[in-house]
Amino acid sequence: MILNKEFKKIDMKKNLLLIAAFITGGYAFAQVTDTVSMGAGYGNENYYTLNNGNEVAVVRNDWDLAFASDGVGGASSTIRINGPMGVELYKYSNSIGDWSTVDTTGFAWSANQLVDSEESWTVGAFNNIAPVSGFDLGWGTYSTTTHIVTGDRIFILKLAAGNYKKLIINTLSSGVYSFQYADLNGSNLVNTTITKSNYSGKNFGYYSIQNTASLDREPVSSSWDLLFTKYITDLGIYYGVTGVVANVGVEVAQVYPVNDVNTESHLGQSYTPNITTIGYDWKQYTGTYVIEDSLVYFVEVPNADIYRIIFTGFGGSSTGDFIFTKELVGTVGIEEDVEESEILSVYPNPVSDIVNVTFIGSNNTQISIYDVTGKQVFEKNSSNTGLTQEKIDVSNLKKGIYFLMLTTAKNKSTQKIIVQ
């Protein structure tokens, strides 16, 4: 057998990607152990950035309502509640004409309770109602003529202190939410507004009914990836759990069970925009907190970097500490403009035992090694697609020059290796 020794050269763009992506044995960024704390009693929530470990901690209990700004989406009408702090929302009436006659005698509380979605930032408790039309946004109806959302429902809000308010979101017009609330008997009426542009680049602007004040309390959306917080989930009853929520535009793959969390590949995993994919259930309380040791998360942030997250400890309410390792393991799209089966990197080279081969795989890639006479001395099939790494043991080969070949139905790629 005569091999074509005109080895394929990798262009400059690919070389730059490889220099940025790989150092012998793995990705160019080492595994880092970090701790993010919500504080004793989970008094804070913490906005966290993966690439630099930056944290922004804010008090959890100072707000009642959150109104979507342009971080969630410029056209969003999302309104969320501070459920984990004890705020509860109920739909009272589909007619705002009932405002002056609100009476909770015999009211079906459990049947009318509304909670924030735990899957998406864009569905708040006020929106979490089965729509009666294509323009029903939960708390109001959108007009295609005026482009105004007009409120058409009355809600009852139970505050964390235990007192009740009746509430109407009157309009969302030109980026301004107008709403009113009062005691159930109509006293202490407040009419107020929240303006989206006051929270430009942020997911939400906040309002405190308890303090009759608007609040600017979160960092801009582009500056953080994960929120360490409490949120409401359905465990047969609505219950506040402590966990990790992903930002808008962040996708997460949960992989379980795995043999080795530190070597599990991000390639070929299933990523989802569900904001609580990490969530709370990587830990269990059995008198002390036990961390699932066969579970790994891959987090894809908006710039397409992918991080491996492994939780190693949790301090509970005494400290509020989340302890985990993180590692930058890849970048989406590194295989763009690279042909199927093309060898991107072979290292170390020369090699004495294990050689790492990085390539763009197809459904069935044949990996072969030939000596200088054309004799095949190694063969293996890989079924991985996309950016792939394979470790090949060459310790049983004699010292000398060999040729590594990748073959698919469409392409071949060859690279010289030296065994020493």
Image (tube, helix red, strand yellow):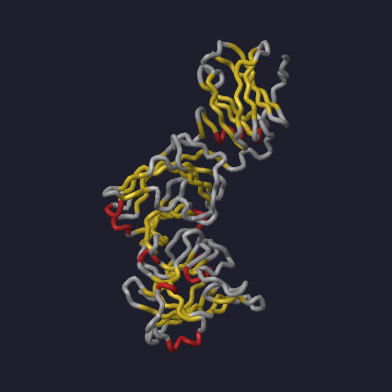
Whether residue 1 can be seen here: yes
Task: Give percent across and percent down for residue 248.
Answer: 52, 56
Q: Position of residue 257 (x, y in %)?
A: 45, 40
x, y (%) of residue 240?
37, 61
* Horizontal side of residue 42 vs 250, given as left or right: left
Q: Quadrant of residue 347?
A: top right
**Quadrant, the N terminus:** top right
| Image vertical order of residue 75 relative to residue 282, above or below | below
Q: Is residue 321 left or right of residue 256?
A: left
Residue 17 visible here: no
The C terminus: image quadrant: top right
Left or right? Give the position of 290 relative to 302. Answer: left
Residue 392, located in which quarter of the rendered image? top right
Q: How many marks?
A: 0
121 up-or-down from 19: above or below:
below
Asked if 32 appears above or below 419 in the picture, the reply is below
Residue at the location (69% across, 34% down)? 339
132, 144: nearer the viewer: 132
What is the residue that sits farthest to the bottom in this orientation? 100
**222 or 169: which is nearer to us?**
169
Q: Position of residue 335 (x, y in %)?
A: 63, 38
Q: Is residue 360 above or below residue 306?
A: above
Q: Residue at x 26, y 49 (%)?
A: 287
Residue lying at 50% horizontally and 18% vertically, measured from the top left: 353
